[in-house]
């Protein structure tokens, strides 16, 4: 059974990786793009008697994603896969009990789970979603989080520019969305980060201050999410200080409220333990963690925090494009965090809106991250004790993140130079 399941999993991953790459290459002037276009058009004529994609919007893509999520979730619930299997705890049961603890007026951040206890590292906004879902038991929890997670697709459609159809297809076929969100509760709950960023970008087109307030509240679900929200507020010259202040005040206010109610029961699992978490990492920190060579010193967290704050401020003052600003901060966070799990790579989904080159980097990041997490780390390193393949892939992923980070900054500097040239000069 396990061999059959693994074969299907790797087959789905390979197929999606190829499809995702085809979406990137299709509009390009490369030899691969020229080879793909007539074949895709011929396939479209065969299937739909049309040779265009104008009929395709976010709705069929979201339905397909929800069907996949429902199929995997139903199988997991009915087969008992999401139940208790000693030794160990069950993440779905832990999230469910967190929601129930909220209704009971007890601590929702450390809950009983399969005879033990589990920490829930999600803040107030996520706990409220858990609470709503828990009213329907485990199926209700998956329904609520499935709707939240896959709202990333319509939000991508509405925030993206003229190339929204290609961006949507890229996101919908990316390993950062389909297998990650549809196959596990951790992926679905972490999707609150890109959903928050995209929702804030969408609302900013209507009211920047309201967008900042909504983003500040939803950022309490995963506290690093406040960084791209703050950085992106600098894109609006007129309201940027007001939006920055509102986002920070709303986030800080609800965080302070959570601390006032739950004290250290909230502060430890949601903030402090996450800052110092060093289980494993898919970036350069992973090389040291695999060798048990990363010192447990406060200065590492201090340097990380200082660089993150500096990055947010640099983006706030220098970047005048909200998508670019949020993308730079998200990529910088992925480089700086000492706990870059595969689930956290879903944070990078909004970067797909930053252009075709950014989507190429994202494809490579998703591909390398998948191979590292599913094979090099979980099988070769943990099961067989062979750590060097995972360490090599940690370095490769770090190089890819640096490449994306530099490319995003170059794009913003080019945009600033273009806008400076375009500005009219008043004669003296």
Image (cartoon, rainbow, N blue to C red):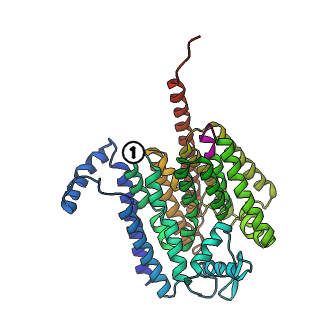
Residue 343 to residue 89: above or below:
above
Q: How many marks?
A: 1
Q: Residue sitting at 81 percent across and 57 percent down?
A: 298
Asked if residue 203 shows in the view, the reply is yes
Q: Is residue 293 visible?
A: no
Rendered image quadrant of residue 300: bottom right
| Residue corresponding to mark 1 | 162
Q: Is residue 426 left or right of residue 257?
A: left
Question: Does the magenta portion include 235?
Answer: yes
Q: Is residue 78 left or right of residue 15?
A: right
Q: Residue at x 67, y 40 (%)?
A: 314
Residue at image location 27% in from the left, 45% down from the top: 34
Residue 101 percent across, percent down from the top left: 69, 81
**Closer to us: 390 or 177:** 177
The vertical placement of 239 against 371, above or below, is above
Quadrant where the N terminus is found in the figure: bottom left
Q: Secondary structure at mark 1?
A: loop
Image x and y of residue 395, in percent: 59, 54
What residue is rendered at 60% in x and 78% in y?
Answer: 91
Relative side of 366 to 229, left or right: left
In this view, the residue in front, 149 or 131, is: 131
Q: Does 124 lie within the magenta span?
A: no
Residue 397 in the image, given as x and y percentages of width and height: 55, 54
- In the rendered image of this protein, does residue 313 appear above or below residue 5? above
Front one among 198 and 4: 198
Give the side of residue 393 with respect to residue 1, left or right. Answer: right
- Badge 1 crowding class, 10 Å Cα cut-off, few under 14, some 14 to 19, many 20 or more, is few
Give x and y (percent) for residue 359. 45, 50
Looking at the image, which is closer to me, 166 or 393?
A: 166
Magenta residue span: 232-238
Q: Please state, as top left, top right, bottom left or bottom right, where the C terminus lies in the image.
A: top right
């Amino acid at each position: 059974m396990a061999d059959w399941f693994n074969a299907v999993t790797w087959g789905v991953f390979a197929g999606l990786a190829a499809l995702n790459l085809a979406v990137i290459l299709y509009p390009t002037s490369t030899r691969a793009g020229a080879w793909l276009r007539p074949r895709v058009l011929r396939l479209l004529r065969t299937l739909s008697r049309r040779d265009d994609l104008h009929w395709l919007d976010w709705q069929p893509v979201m339905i397909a994603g929800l069907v996949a999520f429902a199929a995997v979730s139903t199988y997991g619930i009915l087969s008992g896969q999401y139940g208790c299997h000693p030794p160990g705890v069950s993440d779905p049961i832990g999230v469910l009990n967190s929601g129930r603890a909220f209704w009971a007026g007890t601590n929702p951040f450390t809950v009983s789970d399969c005879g033990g206890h589990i920490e829930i590292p999600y803040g107030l906004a996520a706990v409220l979603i858990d609470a709503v879902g828990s009213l329907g038991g485990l199926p209700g929890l998956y329904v609520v989080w499935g709707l939240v997670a896959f709202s990333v697709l319509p939000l991508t459609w509405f925030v993206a520019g003229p190339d929204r159809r290609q961006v949507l297809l890229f996101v919908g076929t990316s390993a950062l969305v389909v297998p990650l969100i549809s196959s596990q509760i951790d992926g679905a709950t972490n999707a609150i980060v890109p959903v928050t960023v995209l929702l804030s970008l969408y609302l900013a087109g209507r009211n920047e201050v309201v967008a900042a307030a909504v983003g500040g509240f939803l950022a309490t679900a995963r506290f690093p999410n406040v960084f791209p929200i703050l950085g992106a507020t600098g894109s609006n010259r007129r309201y940027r200080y007001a939006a920055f202040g509102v986002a920070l005040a709303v986030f800080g206010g609800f965080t302070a409220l959570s601390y006032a109610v739950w004290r250290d029961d909230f502060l430890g699992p949601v903030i402090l333990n996450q800052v110092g978490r060093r289980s494993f990492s898919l970036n350069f920190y992973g090389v040291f963690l695999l060798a048990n060579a990363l010192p447990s010193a406060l200065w590492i967290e201090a340097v990380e925090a200082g660089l993150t704050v500096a990055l947010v401020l640099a983006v706030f003052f220098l970047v005048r494009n909200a998508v670019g600003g949020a993308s730079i901060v998200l990529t910088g966070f992925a480089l700086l965090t000492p706990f870059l799990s595969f689930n956290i790579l879903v944070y990078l989904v909004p970067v797909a809106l930053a252009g075709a080159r950014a989507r190429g980097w994202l494809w490579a990041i998703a591909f390398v991250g998948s191979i590292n997490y599913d094979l090099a780390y979980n099988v070769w390193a943990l099961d067989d004790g062979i750590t060097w393949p995972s360490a090599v892939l940690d370095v490769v992923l770090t190089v890819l993140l640096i490449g994306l980070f530099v490319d995003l900054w170059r794009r913003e500097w080019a945009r600033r130079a273009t806008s400076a040239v375009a500005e009219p000069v008043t004669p003296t």
